[in-house]
Image: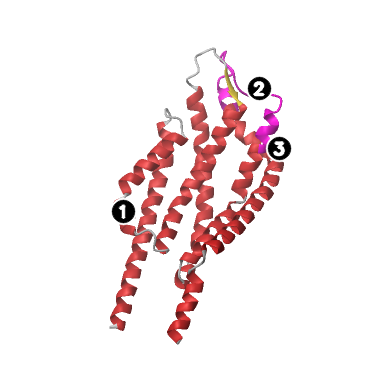
Amino acid sequence: MTAVKDRGQKNREKRMSLGAHLIELRKRLFISALAVVVGGIAGWVLTDLFVWEAIQDPVKRVAEANAAGEGTTAIIFPTISSAFDLRLQIAFTLGLVLSSPVWLYQIFAFLVPGLNTRERKFTFAFFATAIPLFFAGCAAGWFVLPNIVKLMTSFVPAGAESLLTAKEYIDFVLKLVVAIGVAFVVPVFLVLLNFAGILSAAALIKSWRIAILVIVLFTAIATPSADVVSMFMLAIPMIALYFAAWGIAHLHDKRVERRNRLEFGSAV
Protein backbone atom coordinates (compact mmCIF):
# COMPACT_ATOMS: atom_id res chain seq x y z
CA MET A 1 0.00 0.00 0.00
CA THR A 2 2.84 2.34 0.88
CA ALA A 3 4.59 1.51 -2.38
CA VAL A 4 1.45 2.37 -4.36
CA LYS A 5 1.10 5.64 -2.48
CA ASP A 6 4.76 6.53 -3.12
CA ARG A 7 4.37 5.65 -6.79
CA GLY A 8 1.30 7.85 -7.10
CA GLN A 9 3.07 10.74 -5.41
CA LYS A 10 6.06 10.31 -7.73
CA ASN A 11 3.77 10.31 -10.79
CA ARG A 12 2.09 13.52 -9.65
CA GLU A 13 5.49 15.07 -9.02
CA LYS A 14 7.18 14.09 -12.28
CA ARG A 15 4.47 13.39 -14.87
CA MET A 16 2.09 15.88 -16.43
CA SER A 17 -0.41 15.43 -19.21
CA LEU A 18 0.11 17.17 -22.56
CA GLY A 19 -2.71 19.58 -21.77
CA ALA A 20 -1.15 20.45 -18.41
CA HIS A 21 2.21 21.04 -20.12
CA LEU A 22 0.58 23.40 -22.64
CA ILE A 23 -1.24 25.31 -19.89
CA GLU A 24 2.02 25.59 -17.94
CA LEU A 25 3.87 26.75 -21.06
CA ARG A 26 1.21 29.38 -21.80
CA LYS A 27 1.46 30.73 -18.26
CA ARG A 28 5.25 30.91 -18.44
CA LEU A 29 5.15 32.65 -21.83
CA PHE A 30 2.60 35.20 -20.60
CA ILE A 31 4.69 36.09 -17.55
CA SER A 32 7.82 36.38 -19.72
CA ALA A 33 6.06 38.57 -22.29
CA LEU A 34 4.69 40.84 -19.56
CA ALA A 35 8.19 41.21 -18.07
CA VAL A 36 9.61 42.10 -21.51
CA VAL A 37 6.91 44.77 -21.99
CA VAL A 38 7.66 46.32 -18.59
CA GLY A 39 11.37 46.20 -19.34
CA GLY A 40 10.69 47.76 -22.75
CA ILE A 41 8.96 50.73 -21.10
CA ALA A 42 12.03 51.22 -18.94
CA GLY A 43 14.20 50.80 -22.04
CA TRP A 44 12.24 53.55 -23.84
CA VAL A 45 13.14 55.96 -21.02
CA LEU A 46 16.76 54.80 -20.76
CA THR A 47 17.33 55.25 -24.50
CA ASP A 48 17.20 59.03 -24.16
CA LEU A 49 19.22 59.10 -20.96
CA PHE A 50 22.38 57.29 -22.06
CA VAL A 51 21.74 54.22 -24.25
CA TRP A 52 21.67 55.96 -27.63
CA GLU A 53 24.76 57.97 -26.71
CA ALA A 54 26.56 54.73 -25.80
CA ILE A 55 25.47 52.98 -29.02
CA GLN A 56 26.78 55.72 -31.30
CA ASP A 57 29.96 56.26 -29.28
CA PRO A 58 32.08 53.82 -31.39
CA VAL A 59 31.07 55.70 -34.53
CA LYS A 60 31.92 59.02 -32.89
CA ARG A 61 35.38 57.74 -32.00
CA VAL A 62 36.03 56.79 -35.62
CA ALA A 63 34.74 60.18 -36.79
CA GLU A 64 37.03 62.00 -34.34
CA ALA A 65 40.01 59.89 -35.40
CA ASN A 66 39.32 60.78 -39.04
CA ALA A 67 38.63 64.45 -38.34
CA ALA A 68 41.95 65.48 -39.84
CA GLY A 69 41.17 63.68 -43.10
CA GLU A 70 38.62 64.45 -45.77
CA GLY A 71 36.32 61.50 -45.02
CA THR A 72 33.20 61.58 -42.86
CA THR A 73 31.75 58.84 -40.65
CA ALA A 74 28.21 59.28 -39.35
CA ILE A 75 24.92 57.50 -38.64
CA ILE A 76 22.07 58.62 -40.86
CA PHE A 77 18.27 58.20 -40.63
CA PRO A 78 17.10 57.91 -44.26
CA THR A 79 13.32 57.93 -43.66
CA ILE A 80 11.01 60.10 -41.59
CA SER A 81 9.90 57.20 -39.39
CA SER A 82 13.25 55.44 -38.99
CA ALA A 83 14.19 57.27 -35.77
CA PHE A 84 10.91 56.24 -34.09
CA ASP A 85 11.12 52.66 -35.38
CA LEU A 86 14.68 52.30 -34.12
CA ARG A 87 13.81 53.68 -30.72
CA LEU A 88 11.10 51.03 -30.44
CA GLN A 89 13.63 48.38 -31.44
CA ILE A 90 16.17 49.58 -28.89
CA ALA A 91 13.49 49.72 -26.18
CA PHE A 92 12.35 46.16 -26.96
CA THR A 93 15.92 44.83 -26.88
CA LEU A 94 16.60 46.59 -23.60
CA GLY A 95 13.36 45.12 -22.28
CA LEU A 96 14.62 41.66 -23.28
CA VAL A 97 17.91 42.24 -21.46
CA LEU A 98 16.45 43.89 -18.36
CA SER A 99 13.76 41.23 -17.97
CA SER A 100 16.21 38.34 -18.44
CA PRO A 101 16.02 37.29 -14.75
CA VAL A 102 12.26 36.80 -15.19
CA TRP A 103 12.19 34.87 -18.48
CA LEU A 104 15.24 32.81 -17.60
CA TYR A 105 13.53 31.82 -14.37
CA GLN A 106 10.37 30.89 -16.30
CA ILE A 107 12.41 28.61 -18.56
CA PHE A 108 14.02 26.93 -15.56
CA ALA A 109 10.68 26.64 -13.76
CA PHE A 110 9.17 24.95 -16.82
CA LEU A 111 12.03 22.42 -16.95
CA VAL A 112 12.22 21.78 -13.19
CA PRO A 113 9.41 19.14 -13.11
CA GLY A 114 11.82 16.89 -15.02
CA LEU A 115 14.14 16.83 -12.00
CA ASN A 116 13.69 14.80 -8.85
CA THR A 117 13.32 16.34 -5.40
CA ARG A 118 17.03 16.16 -4.64
CA GLU A 119 18.06 17.76 -7.94
CA ARG A 120 15.52 20.57 -7.65
CA LYS A 121 17.73 22.00 -4.92
CA PHE A 122 20.23 22.87 -7.64
CA THR A 123 17.69 24.97 -9.57
CA PHE A 124 18.58 28.14 -7.71
CA ALA A 125 22.25 27.55 -8.48
CA PHE A 126 21.42 27.17 -12.19
CA PHE A 127 19.36 30.33 -12.14
CA ALA A 128 21.95 32.29 -10.18
CA THR A 129 24.61 31.21 -12.68
CA ALA A 130 22.56 31.91 -15.82
CA ILE A 131 21.83 35.55 -14.98
CA PRO A 132 25.45 36.73 -14.56
CA LEU A 133 26.50 34.64 -17.58
CA PHE A 134 23.83 36.29 -19.74
CA PHE A 135 24.97 39.76 -18.69
CA ALA A 136 28.61 38.71 -19.10
CA GLY A 137 27.83 37.61 -22.67
CA CYS A 138 26.10 40.91 -23.40
CA ALA A 139 29.11 42.74 -21.96
CA ALA A 140 31.48 40.64 -24.11
CA GLY A 141 29.54 41.57 -27.25
CA TRP A 142 29.58 45.21 -26.21
CA PHE A 143 33.30 45.04 -25.46
CA VAL A 144 34.25 43.92 -28.97
CA LEU A 145 31.86 46.36 -30.71
CA PRO A 146 34.24 49.36 -30.90
CA ASN A 147 36.96 47.16 -32.38
CA ILE A 148 34.53 45.86 -35.01
CA VAL A 149 33.32 49.34 -35.97
CA LYS A 150 36.88 50.65 -36.20
CA LEU A 151 38.01 47.72 -38.33
CA MET A 152 35.09 47.74 -40.76
CA THR A 153 35.17 51.50 -41.33
CA SER A 154 38.91 51.32 -41.96
CA PHE A 155 38.18 49.77 -45.37
CA VAL A 156 36.51 52.98 -46.57
CA PRO A 157 38.78 54.58 -49.22
CA ALA A 158 40.57 57.81 -48.30
CA GLY A 159 38.42 60.87 -48.94
CA ALA A 160 35.19 58.86 -49.15
CA GLU A 161 32.28 59.26 -46.72
CA SER A 162 31.13 56.39 -44.52
CA LEU A 163 27.42 56.99 -43.90
CA LEU A 164 26.03 54.17 -41.77
CA THR A 165 22.30 53.56 -42.14
CA ALA A 166 20.85 53.71 -38.63
CA LYS A 167 18.70 50.58 -39.00
CA GLU A 168 21.52 48.37 -40.26
CA TYR A 169 23.90 49.67 -37.60
CA ILE A 170 21.40 49.22 -34.75
CA ASP A 171 20.44 45.76 -36.00
CA PHE A 172 24.06 44.71 -35.95
CA VAL A 173 24.75 46.14 -32.47
CA LEU A 174 21.66 44.70 -30.80
CA LYS A 175 21.92 41.27 -32.41
CA LEU A 176 25.60 41.04 -31.48
CA VAL A 177 24.96 41.89 -27.82
CA VAL A 178 21.88 39.71 -27.29
CA ALA A 179 23.13 36.74 -29.33
CA ILE A 180 26.39 36.53 -27.36
CA GLY A 181 24.44 36.90 -24.11
CA VAL A 182 22.19 33.95 -25.00
CA ALA A 183 25.16 31.89 -26.20
CA PHE A 184 26.87 32.30 -22.82
CA VAL A 185 23.80 30.79 -21.10
CA VAL A 186 23.66 27.65 -23.28
CA PRO A 187 26.21 25.70 -21.12
CA VAL A 188 23.93 26.20 -18.10
CA PHE A 189 21.09 24.55 -19.98
CA LEU A 190 23.40 21.70 -20.97
CA VAL A 191 24.05 21.08 -17.27
CA LEU A 192 20.32 21.30 -16.54
CA LEU A 193 19.59 18.71 -19.24
CA ASN A 194 22.26 16.50 -17.68
CA PHE A 195 20.66 16.79 -14.24
CA ALA A 196 17.30 15.93 -15.83
CA GLY A 197 18.82 12.73 -17.23
CA ILE A 198 18.41 13.81 -20.86
CA LEU A 199 22.05 14.49 -21.74
CA SER A 200 25.06 12.59 -20.40
CA ALA A 201 28.56 13.90 -19.80
CA ALA A 202 29.86 11.21 -22.16
CA ALA A 203 27.70 12.64 -24.95
CA LEU A 204 29.02 16.14 -24.25
CA ILE A 205 32.69 15.17 -24.39
CA LYS A 206 32.09 12.95 -27.40
CA SER A 207 30.71 15.94 -29.30
CA TRP A 208 33.42 18.42 -28.30
CA ARG A 209 34.77 18.79 -31.84
CA ILE A 210 31.30 19.54 -33.20
CA ALA A 211 30.67 21.96 -30.32
CA ILE A 212 33.87 23.90 -31.02
CA LEU A 213 33.03 24.04 -34.73
CA VAL A 214 29.53 25.36 -33.97
CA ILE A 215 30.92 27.96 -31.55
CA VAL A 216 33.50 29.18 -34.07
CA LEU A 217 30.89 29.36 -36.83
CA PHE A 218 28.53 31.22 -34.51
CA THR A 219 31.13 33.81 -33.55
CA ALA A 220 32.16 34.13 -37.20
CA ILE A 221 28.55 34.94 -38.11
CA ALA A 222 28.09 37.28 -35.15
CA THR A 223 31.23 39.25 -36.05
CA PRO A 224 32.39 40.49 -39.46
CA SER A 225 34.49 37.95 -41.35
CA ALA A 226 37.45 40.35 -41.44
CA ASP A 227 37.54 40.76 -37.66
CA VAL A 228 39.28 37.52 -36.65
CA VAL A 229 40.48 38.97 -33.32
CA SER A 230 36.94 39.72 -32.08
CA MET A 231 35.80 36.31 -33.27
CA PHE A 232 38.37 34.50 -31.13
CA MET A 233 37.82 36.87 -28.19
CA LEU A 234 34.22 35.63 -28.12
CA ALA A 235 34.91 32.00 -29.05
CA ILE A 236 37.50 31.27 -26.34
CA PRO A 237 35.27 31.97 -23.29
CA MET A 238 32.37 30.12 -24.94
CA ILE A 239 34.56 27.05 -25.47
CA ALA A 240 35.76 27.29 -21.87
CA LEU A 241 32.13 27.41 -20.67
CA TYR A 242 31.31 24.31 -22.73
CA PHE A 243 34.09 22.29 -21.10
CA ALA A 244 33.08 23.67 -17.69
CA ALA A 245 29.55 22.35 -18.36
CA TRP A 246 31.04 18.96 -19.26
CA GLY A 247 33.08 18.94 -16.03
CA ILE A 248 30.00 19.58 -13.88
CA ALA A 249 27.99 17.00 -15.83
CA HIS A 250 30.80 14.46 -15.39
CA LEU A 251 30.86 14.94 -11.61
CA HIS A 252 27.08 14.65 -11.47
CA ASP A 253 27.03 11.44 -13.53
CA LYS A 254 29.68 9.92 -11.26
CA ARG A 255 27.63 10.87 -8.19
CA VAL A 256 24.46 9.35 -9.67
CA GLU A 257 26.32 6.18 -10.66
CA ARG A 258 27.73 5.83 -7.15
CA ARG A 259 24.33 6.43 -5.56
CA ASN A 260 22.65 3.89 -7.83
CA ARG A 261 25.36 1.34 -7.06
CA LEU A 262 24.80 1.81 -3.32
CA GLU A 263 21.03 1.58 -3.67
CA PHE A 264 21.28 -1.50 -5.86
CA GLY A 265 23.72 -3.11 -3.43
CA SER A 266 21.47 -2.44 -0.46
CA ALA A 267 18.44 -3.79 -2.35
CA VAL A 268 20.32 -7.02 -3.07
Q: Position of residue 7 (x, y in %)?
A: 45, 78
Q: Which residue is mark 2?
A: 78
Mark in the foreground, 1 or 3: 1
Residue designated by label 1 = 205
Q: Is residue 9 above or below residue 135?
A: below
- Residue located 61% across and 34% down the image: 55
Numbered disc 2: secondary structure: loop
**Which of pointers 3 and 2 lies earlier in the amino acid sequence?**
3
User: Magenta residues, as a range?
Assistant: 60-88
Which three-letter amino acid code belongs to the residue tagged 2?
Answer: Pro
Q: How many marks?
A: 3
Q: Which amino acid, by three-letter code, is at mark 1? A: Ile
| Of the pair 173 and 50, the residue shown nearer to us | 173
Q: Which residue does the image show at 68% across and 39% down from the upper left?
A: 47
Disc 1 and disc 2: Cα gap in Å? 50 Å
Residue at disc 3, secondary structure: helix
Disc 1 crowd, CA 10 A, few/some/many (<14, 14-19, 20+): some
Q: Secondary structure at mark 1?
A: helix
Picture residue at 50% right of the left edge, 47% below the top: 182
Against 14, residue 250 (above or below) is above
Q: Label 3 sits on what residue type?
A: Asp
Which residue is under mark 3? Answer: 48
Residue 143, placed above or below residue 26: above
Q: Residues within 10 Å of mark 2 (few under 14, many from 20)?
A: few
Closer-to-camera residue (224/37): 37
Q: Is residue 68 magenta?
A: yes
Location of the N terminus (image quadrant): bottom left
Say whether disc 1 or disc 3 marks the residue closer to the N-terminus: 3
- Measured as percent of width and height from the top left, residue 68 is found at 57, 16
